[in-house]
Amino acid sequence: MHCFDCTRSGQPTPAAAICQNCGAALCEQHAHPVYLPGHPSGLVGPARGQTRRILCAMCSEGIRQPQAPHRPAPARSVPATPERR
């Protein structure tokens, strides 16, 4: 398997990791380790320390940039129709 980003640039390089978010194959140069609060999967209880995830550049950029909290759309009134009267 070859690195997705290197193959797109015309220089196939053997992959060393897989992005844990999108599944793209990555070489050592394109693999981005991201450390998140938590503990390794399979353990229960309060999060302690950090857990490592290997991501591609696109996925790691999405994690590093804070995102606005999701707010539901305001409710809209539905006009009465002859069937609803």
Image (cartoon, grey):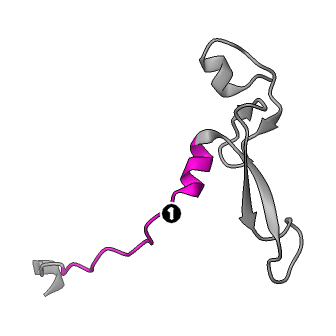
Left/right placement of residue 44 relative to residue 83 reads right
What range of the chain is rendered magenta? Answer: 58-77
**Residue lying at the far right of the rendered structure:** 43
- Residue at x 70%, y 33% (from the top left corner): 30
- In this figure, which residue is indicated by the disc labeled 1? 66
The vertical placement of 63 against 38, above or below, is: above
> Where is 75 relative to 2, above or below?
below
Residue 5 magenta-highlighted: no
Q: At x 37% / y 75%, what residue is drawn? A: 72
Residue 15 pos. (x, y %): 80, 28
Q: Quadrant of residue 16?
A: top right
Task: State whether residue 59 is above or below residue 51.
Answer: above
Residue 11 percent coordinates (x, y) = 69, 13
Q: Is residue 71 left or right of residue 51?
A: left
Identity of the amino acid at label 1? Pro
Could you tell me which residue is drawn at 26 percent across and 80 percent down?
A: 75
| Front position in the image: 29 or 9 | 29
Residue 70 is left or right of residue 22, and the answer is: left
How packed mark 1 is, by other alpha carbons closer than 10 Å (few <14, some 14-19, many 20 or more), is: few
**Percent of width and height locating residue 43:** 89, 73
What is the secondary structure assignment of the residue under circle 1? Answer: loop
Q: Quadrant of the N terminus?
A: top right
Which residue is at 78% across, 71% downward?
Answer: 38
